[in-house]
Amino acid sequence: MTKIAVFGSAFNPPSLGHRSVIESLGHFDRVLLVPSIAHAWGKEMLDYSLRVELIDAFIEDMALKNVARSTIEEQLFSVTQQPVTTYAVLCALQEEIPQAQLTFVMGPDNLFNFSKFYRAKDIAKRWTVMACPEKVAVRSTDIRTALDKKQSIEHLTTAKVCTILTENHYY
């Protein structure tokens, strides 16, 4: 049975905090990064296509063989044009890979809000839910704040993400 970690996040933008969580998931056969296409709680985010560009660069920088970006939210959103729930993502992935054992991975901030997730009890019954604290205390907000203040972000994200953000002024 393939063990797959499903790590959903805004990745707005990807940070070293995200990387520290991903690196702690090495015991999974695959780690799928699932960027939010439209946040269920209305969170303001950089355009999806730009975050995808950043995530792909982030994955390249990490060079971990078991990490990939999932397009499942994109596929689900194209049908409904509505924010995509974690429940919908996990159902669709389970249908796509029926033999997989899925584990939904979230940061500690989301653990406190997990009961507010759509069908949280069903998620917890059907799949494993894992809160994974960041080993490096760097958040996407830190990157956006530093960029706003025209400060260096080299110590907050990976090299390619840093280059893209500083050259393109996305935030």
Image (tube, grey):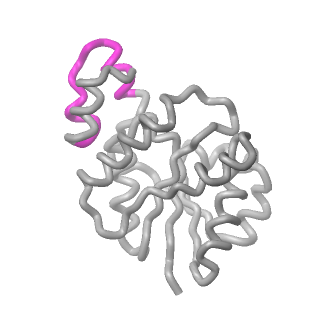
Q: Going by the image, does 78 lie left or right of 31?
A: right
Based on the displayed image, in which of its 4 quarters is residue 31 positioned? Answer: bottom left
Q: Going by the image, does 170 lie left or right of 150?
A: right
Residue 107 part of the magenta-drawn span: no
Residue 107 shows up from this direction: no
Closer to the camera in the image, 26 or 88: 88
Looking at the rendering, the stretch of residues picked out in magenta corresponds to 142-158
Could you say where residue 56 lies in the image, as x and y percent from the top left?
A: 35, 49
Q: Residue furthest top?
A: 149
Question: From what the image shows, is residue 67 above or below residue 78?
Answer: below
Which residue is pictured at 47% across the width and 61% down the height?
Answer: 32
Closer to the camera in the image, 100 or 23: 100
Question: From what the image shows, is residue 74 above or below residue 145?
Answer: below
Q: Going by the image, does 90 lie left or right of 161?
A: right
Q: Residue furthest bottom?
A: 1
Q: Going by the image, does 135 lie left or right of 105?
A: left
Which residue is pictured at 59% across the width and 76% down the height?
Answer: 97
Could you say where residue 14 lies in the image, as x and y percent from the top left?
A: 38, 41
Which residue is pictured at 69% across the width and 39% down the height?
Answer: 40
Which residue is pictured at 40% across the width and 61% down the height?
Answer: 68
Q: Give the mark count.
A: 0
Residue 20 shows up from this direction: yes
Could you say where residue 80 lies in the image, as x and y percent from the top left?
A: 75, 46
Residue 157 part of the magenta-drawn span: yes
Question: From what the image shows, is residue 60 above or below residue 109?
Answer: below
Quadrant that contains the C terminus: top left
Could you say where residue 139 lies in the image, as x and y percent from the top left?
A: 40, 35
Based on the displayed image, in which of its 4 quarters is residue 145 positioned? Answer: top left
